[in-house]
Image (tube, helix red, strand yellow):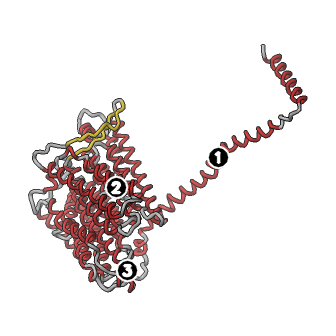
Amino acid sequence: MANLVYLVPLFPLIGFLINGLFWKRMPKALGGIIGTVAILASFIVSLGIFFEVKSEAFHGPVIVTLFDFINSGTLQVPFAFQVDALSSLFLLIITGVGFLIHVYSTSYMSHDEGMVKYFAYLNLFVFSMLLLVLGANYLIMFIGWEGVGLCSYLLIGFWFKNREFTNAAKKAFVMNRIGDLGFLVGMLLVLFNFGTLSYMDFFGKINDASTVVPSSIYNWIALCFFIGATGKSAQLPLYTWLPDAMAGPTPVSALIHAATMVTAGIYMIARSGALYNLTPEVLHVIGIVGLATATLAATIAIFQYDIKKVLAYSTVSQLGFMFLALGVGAYTTAVFHVMTHAFFKALLFLGSGSVIHAMGGEQDIRKMGGLGKHMRVTQATFLIGCLAISGIPGLSGFFSKDEILASVFGHSTIMYALGIVAAMMTAFYMFRLYFLTFNGSFRGTEEQKSHLHESPAAVTIPLIVLAILSIVGGYVGLPAVMSEHNVLASYLSPVITNLGEHHLDHSTEWMLMGLSVAAAVIMIIFAWSLNRKPNFAENKGLAKVLENKWYVDEIYDALIVKPIDALSGVLDKFVDRRGIDGIVNGVGKTVRWGGDRLRLLQTGQVGFYIFIMVLGIVVLFTISFFWVK
């Protein structure tokens, strides 16, 4: 089955080509079916690959080479896929959650005139993400890396007639390019120092004692890769594009923020674990950046009123937790949280889309309330998502978040304490969102109230499936105090080698679990008490700062955007227009001026021409007499 891995990205590519070429003439329903069936076919093949990798008969990784991509002298880069535990797990997440989002989209986008084009973009997005995780070398990963960046631009700005939406798309594209430059430089450093871009060759050389490369090179490569990850996975300081990406259709938000694009950075670092194990200084930087991102985003989410913005900053915060796990060398734990987060965050985004659809496009939670009476399925599934992300026992988020905090506790108690604070804020803002949306009395208009209804089956069925996964998904990674066999860790062990694992005694681990659960429950009760009678008075002081997102966008605008605009204006005026254009236009004007003057010599009088000829003879005679020897 592993030899058929090329079918996994091929099906979405075919779906993209069909919908992309015929989107103007194709019926909307047919476009949705083609796009959805393409992802379903990929999921089925991915499922077969997963079970083959899981079997005892599998001896991987398996490299499937399709053709020579670059073959020049000593440089050989094949277009090849690598099938192992890590890639097969990500295949299931991407195609499984992606399929549910496609099903959801068939209903959510059914009234949009560009629905077929939307599914073409969606298929291309999934194809690019599959290339990213399947590539057997950094170049194929980079192709997929750039592909998801392009597709995010197309999907975020899908409703391009709205200038605000196109600005959000451009912002995402530009900020990702900043990070991508870091990734590209890291790739070039690998190629220059090791002569290869293949994972297996590169990791083999860095673990070979005979390889003579300065240790600083490892640090630079690891740091450059991390810069790439900060852009794609929205870490400080390149995180501000992700909340603005809410401009796209809600299913796009679910796909980008849950299962695909933003997890690319975590995948890349986990895949490069052999490199990062040799660079503890860079890992420390990753841990600090992840913790800072988790905390900062959580503080912002507390005072947001746009239902999708709350979830967006929640995604940034959860990505921060994943990078925190990577920073302490717990790569398996980070991947575990990627998986559980894909379930409950996709559920929450799709649930928010169901709410927005019922509210006629309204996203302000101050104008909602009491929706649970009209949307029982959406309310129940959304509640499960909130419980999972808050780390309530029995749900998937509890197991993965507890494992992150336990790993951090073994590394640094200060980082653990800050992580607990961020986790407490997560529980608070998620249940603030839940209570303001589904509890209490309705605060919208009478017209909105008259249209409140539960979403159709194409919306609610994916919600139910994701809710079930949000409950049971965590049981593949049971902690040592509950089970001696961690299924996920055993599955990933041939591929991922965690750094400096800290094995806590059972009493300490139970205590940490109890502490995190108690903190979450307290914050849920606090959110309930504050929002029984919500007060939407204008925020002041720190609350106003948090509502305005710490003014980070304004700071970037003042320190970066405006100075660059001013410099561009100066360069445009003096270098481009007066300099380059001046020289080019000056040459043209000089030739024209000279031509106008020479034209005056053409008088049509024979006597004048004879005079000029004689004058020329005299000049030539004089020159030859004085200079020619």
Asked if the residue at tag 3 contacts the one at tag 1, i.e. Cβ–Cβ closer than 8 Å, the answer is: no
Q: Where is residue 192, by image quadrant?
A: top left
Count neighbours of disc 1 (C-alpha within 10 A) and say few if under 14, some if 14 to 19, many if 20 or more.
Answer: some
C-alpha separation, residue under disc 1 versus residue under disc 2: 41 Å
**Residue where numbered disc 1 is placed:** 581
| Disc on the earlier residue, 1 or 2 | 2
| Disc on the earlier residue, 2 or 3 | 2
Q: Estimate the x, y position of residue 547 in percent, counting from the top left.
A: 41, 73
**Residue where numbered disc 3 is placed:** 366
**Residue where numbered disc 2 is placed:** 125
Figure check: 465 above or below 624:
below
Count neighbours of disc 2 (C-alpha within 10 A) and say few if under 14, some if 14 to 19, many if 20 or more.
Answer: many
Mark nearest the camera among 2 and 3 is 2
Q: On the picture, is 406 further left or further right than 75?
A: left
The foreground one among 172 and 276 is 172
Instruction: Determine which of the numbered discs, if any, sits on residue 423 in the image.
Output: none
Q: Estimate the x, y position of residue 69 in percent, counting from the top left.
A: 33, 38
Q: On the picture, is 563 further left or further right than 426?
A: right
User: What amino acid is labelled 2 in the image?
Assistant: Phe
User: What amino acid is labelled 3 in the image?
Assistant: Arg
Asked if the residue at tag 3 contacts the one at tag 2, i.e. Cβ–Cβ closer than 8 Å, the answer is: no
The foreground one among 365 and 216 is 365
Q: Residue at x 37, y 69 (%)?
A: 111
Residue at the limit of the structure toward the top, as seen here? 629
